[in-house]
Image (cartoon, rainbow, N blue to C red):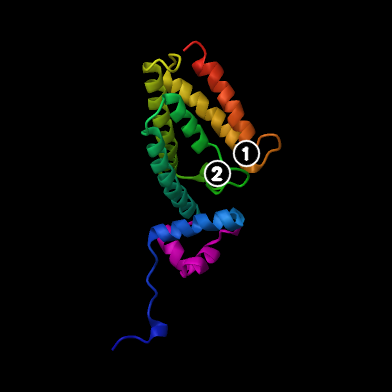
Amino acid sequence: MSAPASRRRTPAPPREEVLAAAMDMIAERGLEKLTMAALGRQVQMSSGHLLYYFHSKDELLLQTLEWSEGRLGAERGRLLTRPGTARERLDAYVDLYVPDGHRDPHWTLWLEVWNRSQNADAAARDRQAAIEGAWHRDLVALLAEGASRGEFRRVDPDRFATRLRALLDGFSIHVAIGLRGTDRVQVLGHVREFLEQALLTGA
């Protein structure tokens, strides 16, 4: 005999659905409203059930960031393989990198995960490094391509990518936290000016 409907277990939603719901909550309500209990209500799971799958809020946040980065990585791949000059694709890379504005959900999550990484174990740190490594490798390849085509000055692509990403990270944090005088338009202007001076002059 089947169990009464009230006693039947509700199937757990797919992992991706949970992560997408977490990201939606960050976008709509802010990170401070993302609790295990609130997320559980959103996906019709108990907070205990969520902890069974994710073990901790830190792990939930890291997996949500990895999921979000996977989507950004797919978009980055499309941008970097489309026809056009290396400079056009570099502009597209920068445009994708910089937050949309104050409280951009992906950057809000990125900042929180990195803040919590002070107490993270080696495995979690390796996963965070993998996120950064994907952005870095794509940028290095793009810089090397642009130099080989004569579009960019000949620079050490790895060293230049490291410095450019440090610049982008600093500006992006300012945009994400809403620091006055550093909105997205201003930041993109600063980056374009830097690239003109450091990468294109004398190409």
Q: Which residues are magenta?
A: 33-56
Q: Quick check: 2 left or right of 7?
A: left
Please state the horizontal and vertical placement of residue 105, each as a whole percent of the image.
55, 49
Q: Amino acid at mark 1?
A: Val
- Looking at the image, which is closer to me, 181 or 127? 181
Q: What residue is shown with label 1?
A: 175
Quadrant of the image occupied by residue 177: top right
Q: Nearer the viewer, residue 150 or 181?
A: 150
**In the rendered image, which quarter contains the N terminus?**
bottom left
The answer to whether 143 appears left or right of 57 in the picture is left
Up the image or down, 95 lies above or below 33; here it is: above
Q: Position of residue 48 (x, y in %)?
A: 47, 67
- Where residue 98 appears, as percent x and y from the top left, is 54, 37
Q: Quadrant of residue 185?
A: top right
**Label 1 vs 2, first from the N-terminus:** 2
Within-10-Å neighbours for mark 1: few <14, some 14–19, many 20+: many
Whether residue 21 sits left or right of residue 30 in the image: it is left
Judged by its main secondary structure, the magenta piece is: helix
Question: Which amino acid is tagged 2?
Answer: Trp
Q: Is residue 39 magenta?
A: yes
In the depicted structure, whether residue 118 falls above or below residue 152: below
Q: Which residue is mark 2?
A: 107
